Image: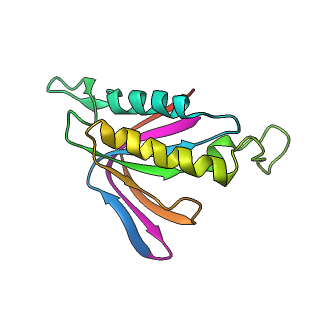
Amino acid sequence: MKVLVQRVKRTRLFVDGTLVSEIPFGLAVYFGVKEGDTPAQAEAIAKRVASLRVFEDQNGKMNLSVKEVGGEILLISQFTLYGDCSRGNRPSFTQAARPEIAEPLYRYEAELLSSCGIPVKTGVFGADMQIEQHNDGPVSVIYEV
């Protein structure tokens, strides 16, 4: 399981031109599942994302979590995090989990993050999404378990 976490000032997610989800500031979390991933890995990811200190404190140091600053999370399913370009110019996605495995883990991740007391919005699993994102910093962190 892999996440790309980006600190954002605002993020809006559209499907077919319709606004589906929006957060005013917080974290855009792109969530990828590979074959063999388990709920225990989703739990580890949620714990790390919820406590990730990437927001600045009063001294300008990245020392605060999304919950501590009153931010939100937009959780976006992203199988392309497991794209492998090592054998050519077209990525292979053979490591990515099939939708029937990945979608329940994605939904579970959203529940776990919400249970941490953080407002969580989601995209539409498997949809072609358009995302307007205003990165803050930019701050981007990749975490994999």
Badge count: 0
Q: Is residue 137 visible?
A: no
Give x and y (percent) for residue 30.
50, 46
Give x and y (percent) for residue 61.
25, 23
* Furthest-right residue in this view: 87
In which quadrant will I find the N terminus? top right
Question: What's the residue at 46%, 61% (across, down)?
Answer: 131
Which region shows up in magenta? 1-17
In terms of depth relative to the viewer, which is nearer, 129 or 118?
A: 118
In which quadrant will I find the C terminus? top right
Question: What's the residue at 74%, 40% (across, down)?
Answer: 95
In terms of depth relative to the viewer, which is nearer, 100 or 2?
A: 100
In the rendered view, does 142 fall on the left or right side of 138? right
In the figure, residue 99 lies in which quadrant?
Answer: bottom right
* Furthest-bottom residue in this view: 17
Give x and y (percent) for residue 101.
64, 47
Is residue 33 inside the magenta stretch? Answer: no
In the figure, residue 112 lies in which quadrant?
Answer: top left
Give x and y (percent) for residue 80.
65, 48
Is residue 2 inside the magenta stretch? Answer: yes
In terms of depth relative to the viewer, which is nearer, 53 or 122?
A: 122
In the rendered view, does 94 fall on the left or right side of 79? right
Is the magenta region chiefly helix, strand or loop?
A: strand
